[in-house]
Amino acid sequence: MNYQAILDGQKAYFNSNVTRDYQWRKQQLLQIKKLVVENEQQILAAINADLNKPAQEAWTTELSYITGDVDHVIGKLKKWMKPRKVRTPLVAQPGKSFVQPEPVGSVLIMGAWNYPFQLVFAPLVAVIAAGNCAVLKPSELAPSVSNIIAQLVPQYLDKQAFTVVEGAIPETTALLELPWDHIMYTGNGMVARIVMSAAAKHLTPVTLELGGKSPVYIDNSANLAISCQRIAWGKWMNAGQTCIAPDYIITTKDMVEPIVAELKQQITAMFGQDPQQSDSYGRIVNERHTSRIAAYLEQQNVVAGGNVDIENKYIEPTIVVDAALDSAIMKEEIFGPVMPIITVDNYLQAKDHIITEDKPLAAYLFTKNTVQQQDWIHTISSGSQCINDVIMFNAVPELPFGGTGPSGMGQYSGKTGFDNFSHLKSVLKRPFLKDLPVRFAPYTDLKFSLLRKIR
Ligand code: NAD
């Protein structure tokens, strides 16, 4: 594939203004929905082949997530595309001022493997809503999904505006050399630095959706049964390979035993006595990642689970207590089905720990204490937060999604996604009425004092 030729073709098409049209955008969005609905079984099978993801989980977090997103965006698109009026000060009167969102051109979308379908199509929905073209680069670590995306996109979407490039590091490196109008990357911080360096050569803006260690603090006022059910769902969904999964629990010593007991009960309730036999439990993406996660368990106090079958990419839902803060499990993003629980004396100590670490993608608090809830919201910096739940902010289309600091930059979802892939152009429109002379030379004391008054 000649990537430069693809980009040149997209730029020419973009400059013909076809993609700016509301009807074109709406039509492409509807085609995405059609693509998902008509190929549901094939897509679910591909996701299952790559991650052994249960159909219900894949449907909820990947397929219906996209169709719901399309419905939401189509419902609002006309409004988002309209000029956004702002006040015009006296000095610029008479005149009308507004922000006119405009598409940027061609966007490179690089997806990650853990939600291999959703992480390509959710950015694409926002990119289309904003009126852009795109090249899609699905993750090579989920080859079945990459393959089906490459097959389906040209069947459903405008070929002049959208191309899928499959491949790994050499292909991505070559794509990154080109002057995109925006790059959207989902993945790890190490590659994000490569992406940002490449983008810097062309001053291309980037959106980086990264990860991190998302903490959960639980205090003794929380309803433990409900908290642990929600936490267990968020941690062990997709075998822990979710960027906003709770990474570890931080709590007081008295809470460890009851939390472990509740979590164990939840694991059995969700996945049975032997989760390896459960149709509801996923697998790790490959043997390399399975070994990486298994290594976190060495020399740790495993109080639940701990069984590993590298060949079958299986790691049992596992709980570790008293992990040392300088051990790998507490230093790196786990991105697997292992839950460490660490202890502190109180809420303030927990907060101290969290704010001295990298800003996480999500931060979760379980408490009835409304003072603590307010404090958490106002003093803990993270991409997103839930109070008394995990992950579910992602089910709210009007909430922006994205990290802060090392967990990412830029946001999407709903209107934020539309704005993220638009340039918000400022426009001042004026009639040919004679201006007040104050702004024009020659400057005089009178003009100066008048100018001070009208500003
Ligand atoms: P990955 O290995 O699939 O990489 C993502 C993309 O980067 C792929 O398209 C891949 O081809 C490309 N890539 C990999 N190495 C490259 C290189 N050296 N040069 C250029 N391109 C390269 O995904 P991953 O990084 O293993 O994903 C896991 C990480 O992603 C976790 O940290 C997770 O938290 C994060 N994540 C974040 C979000 C989010 O929305 N914030 C969502 C999912 C995953």
Image (tube, helix red, strand yellow):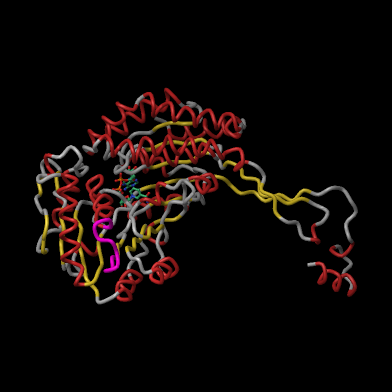
Tell me the residue at 59%/47% (across/down).
423
Picture quadrant of residue 350: bottom left
Is 261 on the left-hand or right-hand side of 173? left
Is 419 on the left-hand or right-hand side of 145? right
Along the line of sight, the residue nearer the viewer: 396 or 168: 396
Is 348 located above or below residue 261 in the figure?
A: below
Is 24 on the left-hand or right-hand side of 300? right
Tell me the residue at 11%/56% (across/down).
304
Coordinates of residue 374 in the picture (x, y in percent): 43, 68
What span is colored magenta in the figure? 218-227
Tell me the residue at 32%/39% (across/down).
116
Along the line of sight, the residue nearer the viewer: 74 or 313: 74
Coordinates of residue 33 in the picture (x, y in percent): 44, 30
Coordinates of residue 210 in the picture (x, y in percent): 36, 53
Quadrant of the drawing holding the C terminus:
bottom right
Quadrant of the drawing holding the N terminus:
top left
